[in-house]
Image (spheres, rainbow, N blue to C red):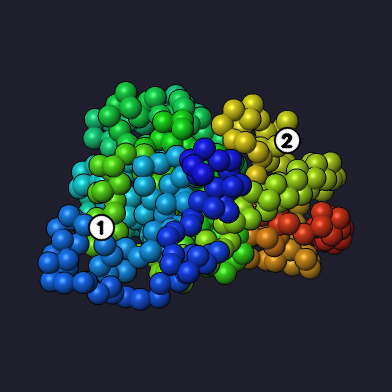
C-alpha cells in the first residue's frame, strides 16, 4: 500500500509505522541514549553520512523518526524535526534561520512567548521585529523592510481568532525573498496545511491538538525543502532541544484519533458558539464558524473546518469574566488548548501577561477576552456548565 495516496485518517493510523522484526502494531519505544555500531568502519560511515544508521538520540532515534515521518506526510513537507516543546520549535526556527540585524514581520496577536522571546531575549542578538495585524495584507506589505528575512504568522491568531490570508502572505514573502513561517497549532494538519498555500516552514505545539490528551509537552517543525530542513535539524541537534523517545511514543498514540477528536470538538464548538452568540450577557464573540466572524469566507477557503477555539467578551467585562471562570465546574480553568477536555482561560492575565498593556490593546487582547478550548465532552454538559456560570454574573 502506498501511504502517500491514502486519506488523512489512514495516515494517522498507519503513517507512523516503522520496520520492526516482531511485527508490533505500535511503534516501540527505543528508550536508549546511544546506538552501538557493528564496527569502527560502520561508526565512521554513520558519522560521515554515508550510511543513515542511528548514532545518538539527540541526533535521531527510531521512535522519534516515526513521528517525524508521519507529520511530514500530514503537512506535505520534505521533512520534520521533532523538538521538546512548541517553544523549542519557535526558537529553533528563529535561531536557525536568522542572523544579527535581520528583521521579522509577525502577527501582533500571536502566542505570547513566541513574541516575548524576541522582544525580551533575541533583541540582545540584534534581531529586529515588527508586530502587526497580519490579517491586514496592506499592513504586511508596508511592514517589509530591506532587512526583513522572515514573515512569521499565526492563523487563527491566539487569542483574537483573526485569520491571515496564507496565499496572499506567501506571495508577498516570495516576491521579497523572505521565508514564511506559520504556527499551525490552532488548526493541526487536519484543518490547515500552510505549505500548500506557499509557506516555507510550519510548526506545531504538539502539546495541543496533535497529542490532544494534556499529558505531553512537545513540538515539531516541518520544512518544505531539504536545504531549510537541514539547517533546522542542525540547529536542533546543536541546541539540544530534541524530543525524548517516550514523549514521541505518547504523541504517536495521541495522534491516531486526531481527526475524530477534532470532528467532535468542532461540532461542540459550533454549538457553543451559537449558544454564546445568542446569550444576553455576551458582548461579542469570535469564532471562524460564525457568519459574524469578519473573515468567515477566508476561513472557509484555507481551513477545512472551524476548529475548537472560541474567544468572547462579556458585557460586564473583566469582572464578569472572573465570575464566569470562578463558577464553571466542568470546564477546567487552565491554559493550554486542543485537548479532549474543555478549558477556559483569561489571556490578558495568563498566557499574554508578559506582553505590555499597550501592545495587548493594539493587538486586540482586551481585558474582557475569555478564551475557550472546547473539548469532546457531551455538548449539553458543556453548555449547561457555561449557562449556570453565566447566571451567576
Ligand atoms: C502552546 C503554544 C505554543 C508553545 O508550545 P509549548 O508546547 O507550550 O512550548 C506555541 N504556539 C501556540 C499557538 C500555542 O498554543
Residue occupying image coordinates x 35% and y 76%: 32
Query: Of residues 75 and 337, which is closer to you in this image?
Result: 75
**Which residue is under mark 2?**
290
Q: Nearer the viewer, mark 1 or mark 2?
A: 1
Relative to 220, 344 lies left or right: right
Asked whether residue 124 appears in the rendered view, the answer is no
Q: Which mark is residue 52?
A: 1
As drawn, is 80 to the left or to the right of 250? left
Q: Is residue 299 above or below residue 112?
A: above
Is the CB of mark 1 within 8 Å of ligand 1? no
Mark with earlier residue (1, 2): 1
Q: Which mark is residue 381?
A: none
Under circle 1, the secondary element is: loop
Q: In terms of secondary structure, where does tag 2 sit? A: loop
Q: Is residue 248 above or below residue 148?
A: below
Q: CA distance from mark 1 to mark 2?
A: 49 Å
Looking at the image, residue 255 sits to the left or right of residue 234; the answer is right
Q: Nearer the viewer, residue 182 or 216?
A: 216
Q: Residue 130, position in %: x, y?
A: 37, 40
Residue 55, how many percent across, how many down?
A: 25, 67
Q: How many marks?
A: 2
Is 27 in front, or is 246? 27
Residue 105: image location, x then y, percent: 37, 38
* Residue beneath the point at 41% across and 31% down: 198
Q: Is mark 2 within 8 Å of ligand 1?
A: no
Which of 241 and 292 lies nearest the eye of the viewer?
A: 241
Which percent across, then down, holds residue 291? 73, 30
Disc 2 crowd, CA 10 A, few/some/many (<14, 14-19, 20+)? some
User: Which residue: 70% across, 66% down?
Assistant: 332
Amino acid at each position: 500500500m502506498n501511504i502517500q495516496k491514502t486519506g488523512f485518517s489512514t495516515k494517522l493510523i498507519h503513517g507512523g509505522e516503522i520496520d520492526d522484526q516482531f511485527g508490533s502494531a505500535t511503534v516501540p519505544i527505543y528508550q536508549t541514549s546511544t546506538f552501538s555500531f557493528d564496527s569502527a568502519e560502520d561508526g565512521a560511515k554513520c558519522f560521515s553520512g554515508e550510511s543513515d544508521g542511528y548514532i545518538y538520540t539527540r541526533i535521531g532515534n527510531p521512535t522519534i523518526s516515526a513521528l517525524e515521518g508521519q507529520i511530514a506526510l500530514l503537512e506535505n513537507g520534505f521533512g520534520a524535526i521533532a523538538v521538546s516543546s512548541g517553544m523549542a520549535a519557535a526558537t529553533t526556527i528563529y535561531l536557525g534561520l536568522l542572523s544579527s540585524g535581520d528583521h521579522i514581520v509577525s502577527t501582533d496577536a500571536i502566542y505570547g512567548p513566541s513574541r516575548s522571546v524576541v522582544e525580551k531575549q533575541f533583541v540582545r542578538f540584534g534581531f529586529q521585529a515588527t508586530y502587526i495585524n497580519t490579517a491586514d495584507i496592506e499592513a504586511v506589505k508596508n511592514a517589509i523592510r530591506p532587512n526583513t528575512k522572515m514573515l512569521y504568522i499565526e492563523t487563527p491568531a491566539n487569542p483574537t481568532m483573526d485569520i491571515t490570508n496564507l496565499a496572499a502572505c506567501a506571495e508577498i514573502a516570495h516576491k521579497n525573498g523572505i521565508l514564511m513561517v506559520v504556527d499551525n497549532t490552532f488548526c493541526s494538519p487536519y484543518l490547515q496545511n500552510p505549505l500548500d498555500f506557499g509557506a516555507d516552514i510550519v510548526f506545531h505545539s504538539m502539546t495541543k491538538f496533535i497529542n490532544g490528551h494534556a499529558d505531553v509537552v512537545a513540538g515539531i517543525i516541518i520544512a518544505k525543502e531539504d536545504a531549510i530542513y537541514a539547517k533546522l535539524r542542525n540547529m536542533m541537534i546543536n541546541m539540544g532541544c530534541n524530543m525524548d523517545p517516550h514523549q514521541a511514543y505518547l504523541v504517536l498514540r495521541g495522534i491516531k484519533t486526531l481527526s475524530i477528536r477534532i470532528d467532535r470538538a468542532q461540532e461542540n464548538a459550533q454549538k457553543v458558539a451559537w449558544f454564546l452568540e445568542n446569550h444576553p450577557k455576551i458582548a461579542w464573540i469570535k469564532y471562524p464558524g460564525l457568519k459574524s466572524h469578519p473573515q468567515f469566507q477566508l476561513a472557509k477557503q484555507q481551513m477545512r473546518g472551524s476548529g475548537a477555539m472560541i474567544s468572547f467578551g462579556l458585557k460586564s467585562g473583566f469582572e464578569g469574566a472572573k465570575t464566569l471562570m470562578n463558577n464553571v465546574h466542568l470546564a477546567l480553568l487552565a491554559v493550554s488548548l486542543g485537548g479532549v477536555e474543555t478549558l477556559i482561560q483569561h489571556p490578558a492575565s495568563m498566557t499574554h501577561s508578559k506582553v505590555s498593556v499597550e501592545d495587548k490593546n493594539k493587538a486586540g487582547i482586551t481585558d474582557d477576552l475569555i478564551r475557550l478550548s472546547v473539548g469532546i465532552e457531551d455538548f449539553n454538559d458543556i453548555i449547561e456548565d457555561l449557562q449556570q456560570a453565566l447566571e451567576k454574573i
